[in-house]
Amino acid sequence: MADLKIFAMRLLGFAVLSTMAVNAQLVPSPDVTNGFTNGRLWQKLDAGEKVFFLVGCEDALLLGSMTVTGDYTKIPEQLKWPELTPTETAKELDLLYSEGANGPIPIIFALRYVRHKAAGDTPDQLQQLLASLRRIGAPK
């Protein structure tokens, strides 16, 4: 029963993520940066939606990794997921996006910051990463 519940949660998360991705491609808005949903959208989601979004992202990254490498256990470094629960990851993203300058950073890229923070990168390393992420989110 628990496996079915987890499967249903992952399926719903993937559906939410897919819908948001399609919306991001079709509707230009401040919630999208370079085709990716960003922190402005993140701040509009409630706690449950954030968890579903993250579960969908993780599944999509695993699927993408499996497609590229042929083995979902061989995840490229850039695609590795934070060693946190979805709820903990959501809290870290909330902290990151609480600073207005970080709003344009795409969520999928912000997850790199959370992963590095959770892994114990130094404040200087995190600041350098954050500066590069802000450049990704800067208008072209």
Image (tube, rainbow, N blue to C red):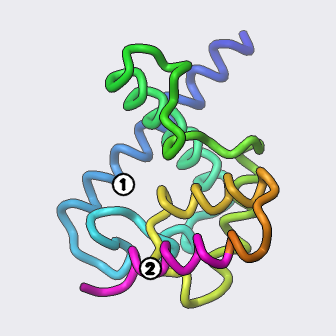
* Quadrant housing residue 77: top right
Q: Quadrant of the N terminus?
A: top right
Position in image of residue 137 (x %, y %): 40, 78
Cβ–Cβ under 8 Å for marks 2 and 1? no
* Residue at 74% from the left image edge and 41% from the top image edge: 83
* Residue at 58% from the left image edge and 53% from the top image edge: 49
Membership of 131 in magenta stretch? yes
Of residue 5 and residue 36, the one placed in the foreground of this image is 36
Q: Quadrant of the C terminus?
A: bottom left
Q: Is residue 15 above or below residue 100?
A: above
Residue type, label 1: Met
Location of mark 2 (residue): 104
Location of mark 1 (residue): 20
* Residue at 42% from the left image edge and 29% from the top image edge: 65
Secondary element type, mark 2 = loop
Residue type, label 2: Pro
